[in-house]
Image (cartoon, coloured by chain):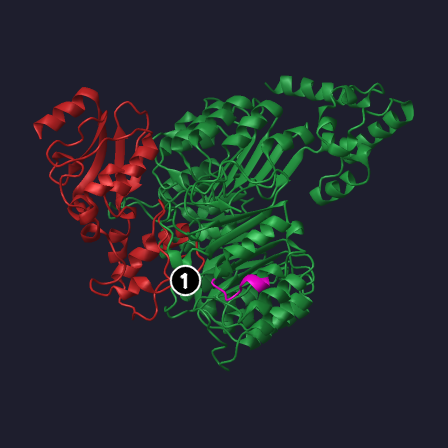
């Protein structure tokens, strides 16, 4: 995707990594395989927050407990509520003209290309290239989001981390609405 | 609608009894069955009479293993069996094509399809791997208009699939989705609305997207046929008033499993309106915060439970407020099945409750009940057949509130135990051996010592002896999952003594290829083998060449396999489909050094060759 190339230089900066910053070798241990999935990834999230010594890295899919159960335990975790707030980040996604809303967990995506690809798959549209000056020129749809302050912004304008922590909901706009927003920005 | 069904069935019966069998006239299946290439045998009265007799006899045969045996007797028996099999079970959706199913079996009323292998549950498989229901619903929609029941496990089901299902089968009665994904509440709404004969709608441990559709309101007005409604896995709020109205107009409802968005007060209202329930999923089992501190009188929960005289199965407790748990006491003595596995219950809260549960046969819980809780179970639940203990904190370093102590106590108290799944941090060979000696009825033994490669924590030795005792003493064992520090010796024992084992799960175990060889050269009944992160390589894999045609599947991930040996298998065994892929779903820039390394091997026998819907990241050798 052309969009990825534009941002290639930025990917490393915005990429979420396992382990503390500076401990690059944690990722290299052969046991850790990063499975990207649309499911909630509680194990990797726990890794970021836990203070377990580096020798005991969490392994994907081990112990063999379904994420469904792990999620429930986190919901019930009376002792430690930190996990609860950070583990999932659901936002509603609507697309103009589509009958159903979707919900996605922003935490499962590490950067804009992943998010956009997932949205494309979900709603069956294709999106054009993004560039800072002209937005999503040439595409029929424009992804927008509502941030903490209630403002509607274009997806991609701010760095990923800032976006993922301030995004409240997403709306894929179509047609003339889209162009209007684009040119206004 | 019901009348039409009856007359349809009456026609069937008439056809069956007639001596001039329209059956052979409709007999399209013989076209595809290779050995019956000659034109159908000249009709003679005797053979038709025999066929009719056989048909009527076979109607009583339900077990699929028996039916499979029957179909092998001769061509005629094969044909008749194919036309009388109404329940079809397909353990691997890729082992045959939907078209083949439709060609062989003509009168299917119930279909059970399993898709992804079990390790997919633990994020070991990249998304979009496959197991789509779509091609199956498309074919069965045309082939089996009288289809009544569909059960899917680990399949990818879309809202469109559900819509097609609802539109294609006017007599549709039962939908059970286990560990499925790909659909949302909009799909559920369509089923609720269009399937007017619906008796069972069970969504179990499935991922259901919240499309913000009030699906409960989509059930048609008027009395329903509902007998079972389970939606405890649906992670979105429901319209409670609509649910209440639905329950009121569902006089046949016996099983109701609500999700955690149903509060205790709401549960009470439901119970009062449905005292005939036999199985109840209790939702959150905590009070909604609005009522707290208002000084209003709380409903009498115990009395509601007392009124449910037929209640034998309890589950839910998703956000349990422990002070309310004693409300279930009136039904404890009747309970045969209890699922506390979503509730963080301490031993003190647990013990007074379990003390009265003498009839419990199936018990699931979190390890928060500790060894003490297990001792209490052992003291009371003498009829226990199935036990599952899940970890509250599923990590490798947690304290671990249950151990060999609890396991041994259970083995001493619950002699009729048949199936156990036990997560723990530490274990001893002595405890495992004790279970093998005390519980001779065990058919399923799954022990998960969460610390990888962890030895017996008292002796420091490998867990070989314990698992060895299990396979030696539990002569009925059909399913085994091993863990902890294990050497090749453990596998040699499993291979030698595991005569009836059909499913074997191995993780982080063994020393060398010999371990895998022992299994593949032993365990004569092995059908499903799933291995991860174990030092088994090409030599081990090759040693099973003579077996793979007779197994349902083999999964090996993060072992020591190379492409070469996988290709060899694929070449040598044309009816085995060999898939290799990585755990990521990227089109990989293959790392040159590791180009040969196989991260995940998934192979399975198939009648119809490699599948056409494999995603790019999967290579079929």
Q: Is residue B489 left or right of residue B133?
A: right
Name the residue nearer the viewer: B16 or B235. Answer: B16
First to last magenta residue range: B533-540
Pointer 1: what residue? B349
Q: Position of residue A18 (x, y in %)?
A: 27, 59
Chain identifier matching the red colour in the rendered picture? A
Q: Residue furthest bottom?
A: B459
Vertical comparison of B237 with B489: above or below? above
> Residue shown at 38%/54% (left/top)?
A70
Vertical comparison of A162 with B98: above or below? below
Q: Is residue B23 left or right of residue B141?
A: right
Q: Position of residue B541 (x, y in %)?
A: 58, 60
Q: What chain does badge 1 belong to?
A: B
Q: Position of residue B288 (x, y in %)?
A: 30, 45
Label tally: 1
Name the residue nearer the viewer: B278 or A19. Answer: A19
Is residue B539 magenta-colored? yes
């Amino acid at each position: 995707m052309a969009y990825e190339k534009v941002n290639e230089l930025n990917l490393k900066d915005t990429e979420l990594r396992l382990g503390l910053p500076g401990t690059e070798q944690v990722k290299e241990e052969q046991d850790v395989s990063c499975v990207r999935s649309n499911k909630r990834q509680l194990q990797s999230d726990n890794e970021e927050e836990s203070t377990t010594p580096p020798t005991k890295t969490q392994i994907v899919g081990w112990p063999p407990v379904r994420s469904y159960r792990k999620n429930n335990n986190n919901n019930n975790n009376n002792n430690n509520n930190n996990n609860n707030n950070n583990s999932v980040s659901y936002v509603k996604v609507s697309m103009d003209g589509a009958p159903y809303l979707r919900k996605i967990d922003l935490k499962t995506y590490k950067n804009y290309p992943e998010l956009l690809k997932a949205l494309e798959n979900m709603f069956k549209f294709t999106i054009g290239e993004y560039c800072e000056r002209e937005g999503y020129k040439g595409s029929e749809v424009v992804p927008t989001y509502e941030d903490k302050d209630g403002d509607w912004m274009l997806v991609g304008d701010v760095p990923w981390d800032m976006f993922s922590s301030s995004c409240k909901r997403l709306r894929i706009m179509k047609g003339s609405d889209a162009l209007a927003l684009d040119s206004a920005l | 609608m019901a009348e039409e069904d009856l007359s349809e069935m009456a026609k069937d019966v008439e056809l069956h009894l007639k001596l001039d069998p329209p059956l052979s006239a409709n007999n399209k299946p013989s076209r595809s069955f290779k050995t019956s290439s000659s034109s159908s045998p000249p009709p003679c009265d005797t053979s038709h009479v025999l066929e009719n007799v056989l048909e009527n006899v076979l109607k009583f045969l339900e077990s699929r293993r028996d039916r499979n045996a029957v179909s092998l007797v001769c061509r005629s028996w094969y044909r008749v069996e194919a036309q009388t099999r109404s329940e079809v079970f397909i353990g691997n959706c890729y082992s045959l094509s939907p078209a083949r199913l439709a060609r062989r079996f003509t009168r299917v009323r119930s279909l059970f399809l399993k898709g992804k292998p079990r390790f997919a549950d633990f994020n070991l498989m990249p998304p979009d791997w496959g197991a789509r229901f779509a091609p199956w619903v498309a074919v069965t929609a045309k082939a089996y208009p009288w289809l009544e029941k569909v059960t899917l496990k680990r399949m990818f089901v879309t809202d469109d699939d559900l819509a097609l299902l609802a539109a294609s089968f006017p007599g549709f009665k039962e939908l059970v989705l286990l560990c499925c994904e790909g659909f949302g509440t909009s799909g559920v709404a369509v089923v609720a609305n269009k399937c007017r004969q619906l008796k069972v709608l069970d969504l179990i441990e499935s991922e259901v997207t919240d499309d913000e559709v009030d699906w409960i309101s989509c059930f048609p007005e008027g009395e329903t046929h509902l007998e079972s409604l389970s939606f405890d896995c649906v992670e979105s709020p429901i319209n409670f008033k609509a649910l209440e109205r639905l329950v009121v107009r569902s006089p046949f409802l016996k099983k109701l499993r609500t999700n955690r968005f149903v509060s205790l007060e709401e549960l009470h209202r439901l119970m009062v309106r449905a005292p005939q329930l036999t199985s109840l999923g209790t939702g959150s089992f905590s009070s909604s915060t609005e009522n707290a501190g208002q000084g209003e009188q709380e409903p009498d929960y115990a009395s509601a439970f007392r009124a449910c005289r037929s209640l034998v199965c309890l589950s839910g407790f998703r956000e349990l407020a422990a002070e309310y748990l004693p409300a279930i006491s009136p039904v404890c003595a009747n309970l045969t099945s209890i699922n506390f596995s979503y509730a963080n219950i301490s031993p003190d809260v647990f013990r007074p409750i379990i003390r009265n549960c003498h009839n419990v046969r199936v018990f699931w819980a979190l390890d928060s009940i500790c060894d003490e809780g297990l001792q209490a179970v052992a003291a009371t639940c003498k009829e226990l057949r199935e036990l599952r203990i899940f970890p509250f904190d599923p990590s490798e370093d947690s304290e671990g509130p249950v151990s060999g102590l609890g396991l041994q106590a259970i083995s001493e108290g619950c002699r009729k135990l048949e199936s156990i799944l036990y997560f723990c941090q530490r274990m001893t060979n002595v405890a495992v051996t004790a279970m093998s000696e005390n519980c001779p009825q065990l058919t399923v033994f799954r022990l998960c010592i969460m610390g990888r490669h962890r030895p017996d924590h008292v002796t420091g030795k490998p867990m070989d002896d314990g698992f060895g005792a299990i396979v030696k003493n539990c002569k009925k064992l059909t399913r085994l999952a091993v863990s902890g520090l294990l050497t090749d010796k453990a596998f040699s024992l499993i291979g030698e003594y595991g005569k009836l084992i059909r499913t074997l799960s191995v993780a982080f175990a063994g020393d060398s290829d010999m371990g895998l060889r022992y299994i593949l050269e032993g365990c004569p009944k092995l059908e499903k083998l799933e291995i991860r992160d174990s030092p088994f390589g090409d030599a081990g894999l090759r040693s099973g060449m003579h077996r793979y045609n007779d197994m349902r599947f083999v999964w090996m991930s993060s072992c020591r396999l190379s492409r070469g040996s996988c290709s060899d298998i694929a070449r040598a065994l044309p009816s085995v489909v060999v898939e290799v892929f990585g755990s990521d779903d990227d089109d990989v820039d293959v790392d040159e050094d590791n180009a040969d390394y196989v991260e995940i091997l998934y192979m399975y026998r198939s009648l119809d060759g490699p599948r056409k819907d494999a995603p790019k990241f999967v290579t079929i050798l």
